[in-house]
Every structure is written in C-alpha cells, then in structure tokens.
Image (cartoon, grey):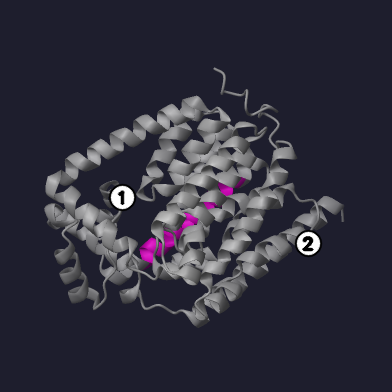
Amino acid sequence: MEEPVQNNLQKLSVYIILTVVNLIAFWVYIQTPPLHSDYGAFYLAGQTAREAPTRIYDFQYQVTQQIQAFNNFVPFFHPPQELLLFAPFSKLPFLRSFHAWQIFSLLCLVASGLLLGKAIGTKPVIAVAIVAAIFPIGICLELGQDSLLLLLVTSGCFYLLRKDADIAAGLVLSLALFKPQLPLILAIALLAFGRTKFAAAFSVAAAALTAGSIAYMGRAGVRGFLFCTKVGGDFLPIFRMPTMRGIIALILGDHQRLALVLLTAVVAIFWHWWRRARLLEFVFATAICVYCFAAPHLFAHDLAVLAVPVMLVSNLSRRPKDPLLLIAFFSAPLFIILYYFDLSALITIPTICLCVACFRLNHGSPTIEDTPHDFRTSGAMI
C-alpha cells in the first residue's frame, strides 16, 4: 500500500474513533431531555415570530411561555434575522422539530466538512470526519444549539475567500451576525490582511442587516432585545466559559471589563501579525482561535468553529500521529472531567495551544493548484 494512502486511512481511523468516543461520552454523561434543551428558546421564538411578532423580546412573555411549555427557561437574545429559520421549524410539534433541527445540524456539519475539504484539498470523507471528531459537536446536537450553522457559514466564507470571491465571502459572513463576536473578529483580521473588498462587503451587509433588524423590532423591541441580551449574558455561570474570562472568573470572580481589555489587547497584538501574514490560512485560523479563547461571551458549544483551524493544522501535518495529538485536546472525556469539577474554563489552554500551532500555517503552502501562491496580493490590491 502506498504511504499517502496508508496515512489517509490512519488519519480517518483516528477521527472516526474520536467521533464515536465523543458521542458515547456525551450520551452517557449528559442525556439532556429535549424539553430542557436550549432549542426550546429557539422553537418558541420562531413560534412567537409567527403569532405575536411584537413580543419576541418581551422578557416576561418569554419566561411565561417557556415555563408553561417546558417548565424550563433559557433566554432568547439572538438578532431577528435568525427567526427566518426558526419560524418554519416551529410549525412542527416540538419533539419532531427538535429532531428535525438535529438532522439539519448534521447536514450543516457534513456541508462544512465538504467545503473545508474542497478549499484545502483534503479528501471529503476525511474532511467530514475531522469536523465530526471535536467534542463541541456532541454538545451542539445534545442541546439543539445553532453553532453548527455558525460553522457552516464560517466554512463557506473561507471557501469563497480561497477562490478570491471576496465580495461574496463578505456577504456570507454577515449571515453569522447571530453570533456577532466571531464575524467581527474575522472581519478585523481580514482587513488587517489587506482583503479590503471583503471588509467593505461585510460592512455594508452588516449595516443593512442591523438597520433591517432595528426597523423590524421597533423601539420597544430594541429595548427588550438589549434587556434579554443582558440577562442572557449573565444567565449561566461565567466561570464555566472556556475562555480567558472564564479563567479570570474561576480565580478572581467575574471581571467583564478586564476580559474586554484583554480581548482588545489580544486583537491589537494579532493585528500586527495579520498585517505581516503571508497566507490566508494563518489569518483565518488564528482569528477563529482568538475568538474561541478571548471572546467575552462564549460557551463550549460555540467552540464548534475550532473545526476550521483543527482541519488546517491537521492538513499541514504529514505524520499520521499528529491528528491524534491535536484532537485529543478537544475530546469529550477531557471536557466532561473538567466540567464535572467546575474547571471547564481550563479548555482555554488547549485552544491557545491550537492557536500557537496555527503559526506553522504562515510558513506552509497552498494546496489548491488554481489558487495564487501569494494570498495577500491576490484580490487585495485590486
């Protein structure tokens, strides 16, 4: 058997084993009943958008509806554009809708793997296996979270950037504003890198979506949205965030302003590296890592986007054992142990290690033949 084929089979077996281990670990440990999942907030928000659109961000109405339906409450504070997706799902009975959303999330996972694999020249089956192997995937499916949709939008943006379709990539990334921290950090990174067309397209699309959302919500809706956002920001224990803010909260108690200062400092430091970067992969991967360890509000399911830098670093490796060493940082058993002892904030450490590994990408070479060698000059100077 030729060595490349053998290496691919070894990589594939590693990712499949990790996927199975992660899913079994979450199934045994968590087993969150659908009625107590995060999806309930999305489901009722979609239902409210169809039946009482002026009350979507009425906090008391959210509480009353969710307690009556699920005897559980999770605040909904996402921008209204995401309701275009939740409203159709809310037409189904809840359990059918929940399982339909899980299927949709799996399709997002597969599509993300295929897009990333095509962008960097990885075989489709290995690309999908890599995406499925990291532990946040199980959390997203268990809770009915929307982070796999975020992964799909991010993967689509990267694919278009690799094809020098900067305007289309900017428009696509604006669809990720239902979790605004990631697209904003990515936009800053790519602006520093010199992709001005991308930054302009993203800015215009983001401004249009924001204006449309404000017009849809109205004055009362905006006030309610801001209140729900404040409640949502403090709803879960901050010390469980797998970020620098989580570590600060774990040691010193929550200091939101300090976390914001640290985020600003990290982005400022990376701005220097992004400006001097040679390759798109480095900029995109490190920006995602910065989001995952420095964002002021983020929980474990949001780390699903780490599939992008994990795949890029894994693709750079030529040794079969490297993927195992890399993905082991993001295994479900490790997370469950840390979460059980209220130490999930320490997941920040392997995320930072992954970010350090991404610096190897700045010295690599593109894997797609039809992509120009120098990504900085490609499209950036037009």
Q: Percent position (x, y) of residue 142?
A: 44, 70
- x 23%, y 63%: residue: 44
Query: Of helix, strand and loop, which one carries label 1?
Result: helix
Seen in the picture, residue 214 relative to 381 is either above or below; the reply is below
Magenta stretch, main secondary structure, is: helix
In the depicted structure, whether residue 380 falls above or below residue 12: above
Q: Counting other residues with Cα less than 10 Å from the Cα at mark 1, is it few (<14), some (14-19), or many (20 or more)? A: some
Residue drawn 63% across the image and 23% down it: 377
Magenta stretch containing residue 103, yes or no? yes
- The location of residue 207, given as percent across then percent down, is 31, 34
User: Is residue 137 shown in magenta?
Assistant: no
Relative height, residue 89 to residue 372 (above, below) = below
Q: Left or right? Give the position of 46 relative to 340.
A: left
Residue type at mark 2: give it: Lys
How far across and down, in percent of the image, does residue 5 sit? 80, 53
Distance from disc 2 to disc 1, alpha carbons, whole Å, reads 40 Å
Instruction: Give the left or right position of residue 232, taking residue 302 as reference.
Output: left
Image quarter (top left, top right, bottom left or bottom right) of the N terminus: bottom right
Image quadrant assignment for residue 351: bottom right
